[in-house]
Image: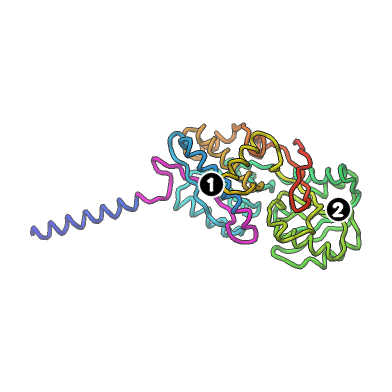
Amino acid sequence: MIKKKIALAITLAMTLGIFSGCGTGSGGSSSDEIDIGVVIPLTGSVAAFGKSARNGLDLLQTEINDKGGINGKKVKFIYGDDENKPASAVNVAQKLINDDKVVAIVGPLTSTCANSVAPILEQDKIPMVTGTGTNPKITQAGDYIFRTCFIDPFQGTVIAKFASGDLKAKTAAILYDNGNDYSKGLADNFQKSFEKAGGKILDSETYNTNDQDFNAQLTKIKNENPDVLLAPDYYSTVGMIAKQARAQGIKSTFLGGDGWDSSDLFTVGGDAVNGAYFTDHYSSKDTSKEVTTFIDSFKKKYKSTPDSMAALNYDAGKVLVQSIQKAGKTDGESIKNALKSYSGTVVSGKITFDKDRNAIKAAVIINVKNNDFDFVKKVQP
């Protein structure tokens, strides 16, 4: 009988130990840590974007924690690789919510992935702040969805006005990815704005995601001889488009959006991308205090100059962290309410949110010149 009691006691102790162990895992926001999820492409077609974003957020995490964290609690960014695939983005977000118990999410980085994840986070009342998802539909998912970048209608308008005004372009052609929300959005808004300014779209061609041969479309565009050619896609694709266009003898000035901003653009496109102009959220050659301070800190940590993906995700993380600090709580509703009333200056400029939780901020025009990105001008909203 005594042996049975001892055995029962040992079994009970082991059981309690097992359950106790289950409750002390590293995931989730503990009493001394606030966990924030990050959904970015660390592999796949735009992995360079994801790596830049992670560098920016890692720098922010270090800066926050060195200053005592949020209300005395350390901040931890937990990363999930969406591969720039909507299905992967959904899986990553669900893991961050259900397993890691994050209080909010930074990202997703691309518009297509952000559009897939936003409805899920809205349903679960988990605040989301994308620093780079520019498609207008993203924040339409609901009150918990925010963005700290401008949206495609503004970006498309800016590059169209620059083409017709500064470049004196009268005609244009467009070549875009019909399966990419970001690419389609920029193409559509550029066309509307360019035509409104008196310009004429001579040809509009499409391709499929992951295509690598654009010669058939470029042959049609070459026959029209437009003043400018808009290629609203990411660096890995537009680099190939530029090389094939120049090989065909197309002389048009290339135009693009913020997806061009990566040093890998030159790895893919070589000299063919020189002479192009694109819209962006930030320039490393901006002399404002916020930019120079950020660049100095980034260079000290990584020995390289930050691109816009590093800056914009740093900004998104900072706006979220400051809002959590202001809320004084980590529940979704408190963070959401603090975000709605946010007003502050980050690396890419002063940010406030409109009624649809989109950032009101300026854009910059960048000229690709001598395998570098030159600051041309800043355009206010």
Tell me how far mark 2 sits from mark 1, CA to CA. 39 Å
In the image, is residue 290 above or below residue 367?
above
> Residue at 17% across / 55% down in the picture?
9
- When the figure is inspected, residue 204 is found, relative to residue 300, above or below; the finding is below
Q: Quadrant of residue 296?
A: top right
Q: Please, what is the three-letter code of the amino acid marked with disc 2?
A: Val
Amino acid beneath label 1: Asp
Q: Which mark is residue 58?
A: 1
Horizontal relation, residue 180 to residue 127: left or right: right
Could you say which is closer to the camera, residue 227 or residue 13?
227
**Foreground label between 2 and 1:** 1
Can residue 348 be found in the magenta stretch? Answer: no
Of residues 300 and 148, the one drawn nearer to the viewer in this rendering: 300
Residue 354 seen from this side: no
Tell me the SS state at disc 1.
helix
Up the image or down, 58 lies above or below 222; here it is above
Query: Which quadrant is the C terminus positioned in?
Result: top right
Stretch of the chain drawn in magenta = 24-50
Would residue 86 be seen by someone viewing this image from the given angle? yes
Pinpoint residue 353: horizontal percent, then vertical percent.
Answer: 64, 35
- Residue designated by label 2: 228
Q: Residue 300, how many percent across, how many down?
A: 57, 44
- In the image, taking residue 259 as reference, residue 60 lies left or right, namely left
User: Dividing the image into 4 quarters, which one contains the N terminus?
Assistant: bottom left
Considering every residue shown, the one lying at the far left of the view is 1
Q: Is residue 183 left or right of residue 343?
A: right
- Give percent across and percent down for residue 277: 79, 49
Find residue 347 and report its horizontal and vertical position in percent: 64, 38
Dot 1 alpha-carbon crowd within 10 angstroms: few under 14, some 14 to 19, many 20 or more: some
| Colour mode of the rendering | rainbow
Question: For the residue labelled by badge 2, is the local secondary structure a helix, a strand or a loop?
Answer: strand
